[in-house]
Amino acid sequence: MTRIDVQGLTKRYGPDTVVDDLSFTVEPGQVTGFLGPNGAGKSTTMKMIMGLAAPTRGSVTIGGRGYRDLPVPLTEVGALLDAGAVHGSRKAYDHLLSLAVSNGLSRGQVGEVLARTGLEGVAGKRVGGFSLGMRQRLGIAATLLGDPQVLIFDEPVNGLDPEGIRWIRDFMRSLAREGRAVLVSSHLMSEMAQTADHLVVIGRGRVIADTGMSEFLQTNGVSSVLVRTLEPGAFARRLTAAGATVRDGRESSLVVSGMTSEDIGRLAVYHGVALSELAPQRASLEDVFMELTKDSLEYEGATAA
Ligand SMILES: Nc1ncnc2c1ncn2[C@@H]1O[C@H](COP(=O)(O)OP(=O)(O)OP(=O)(O)O)[C@@H](O)[C@H]1O
Ligand SMILES: [Mg+2]
């Protein structure tokens, strides 16, 4: 079983510390979502994992070894960091073949990965004519050439249409089901909620959260309760008196926080107030994400410095 182990990873560019003492692991059999706002340090971290940028401090290992110590890297780890990085005049098959040959992999793998990514039909076409979704599939096909146990994808769904997003999401899940360790970055929390088993959230190069996805949703999921009654004004005062925070919602509903729906129900019974609706509201994941990372947004850092 191969995992990625990031230990105290730090990267400085001149005076800027863009990755700051980062530690986390990417476990086999899981999709680990790597989340953070623009400039948080996701791509830089991924480049350091792939040996494309040297850490200022700390270490990254894949199955216990640094990238540069892997005898045939493509058989250990595949990474898609920039889908645009294919020469447009190349045919898809030729692109994959040259990668396979130059890395000492079997030619047979090319057919396999084309089939797996649904690109068989366009294998002989020039990449220049590919849609963004097809390019992304080709990038993914390349990561699979060496049948690696560890896969890294930097913002793979950026710019894709819903069908393309669904395809990538299902693909990541199937890779994890096969026991591979999958690290995938995004700045969209809602996207991660449907893809990841585990979540590493960073802001300004530091870990803000490192948690199981379901655990994360439980702790951060419910934020308020929507209450509807014929006497909203009177009930709002009762709620406030009982310690809840109340604001007006749509169509004269009340949005209550700081009190569970159970307790709100009890309070209504106690005061003989008829409720026509009592509904816990999930905080939108985007809201949770914004809340988590609000102190770490880059432009705020720039003004504070
Ligand atoms: N080669 C470099 N030289 C100097 N600064 C860099 C370099 N590469 C990245 N940075 C800076 O490091 C910080 C983190 O960038 P990085 O690309 O890792 O963030 P990210 O989380 O991937 O963001 P995004 O969501 O926009 O892709 C940014 O402030 C960026 O400007
Ligand atoms: Mg990035």
Image (spheres, rainbow, N blue to C red):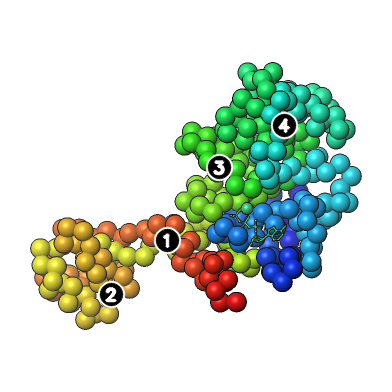
Q: Residue 245 carries which label?
A: 2
In the rendering, at what x and y percent does residue 23 appear?
Answer: 70, 65
Q: In screen coordinates, is 53 left or right of 263?
A: right
The quadrant in which residue 73 appears is top right
Instruction: Please give the name of the residue rendered at 48% of the width and 61% of the height, measured from the top-left corner.
Output: 289
Note whether ligand 1 is within 8 Å of mark 3.
Answer: no
Residue position marked by numbered label 4 in the rendering: 87
Q: Earlier in the sequence, mark 3 or mark 4?
A: 4
Q: Which mark is residue 65?
A: none
Note whether ligand 1 is within 8 Å of mark 2.
Answer: no
The amino acid type, in three-letter code, at marker 2 is: Thr
Front in this rendered view, residue 215 or 233 = 233
* In contact (CB < 8 Å): disc 2 and disc 4: no
The amino acid type, in three-letter code, at marker 4 is: His
The amino acid type, in three-letter code, at marker 1 is: Asp
Residue position marked by numbered label 1 in the rendering: 287
Q: Which of marks 4 and 1 is nearer the N terminus?
A: 4
Image height of 113 relative to 249, above or below: above
Q: In screen coordinates, is 1 left or right of 185?
A: right
* In contact (CB < 8 Å): disc 1 and disc 2: no
Image height of 43 relative to 122, above or below: below
In the rendering, at what x and y percent does residue 102 appear?
Answer: 86, 33
Q: What element carries label 4?
A: loop
Q: Which of marks 2 and 4 is nearer the N terminus?
A: 4
Image height of 119 relative to 159, above or below: above
Q: Residue 157 carries which label?
A: 3
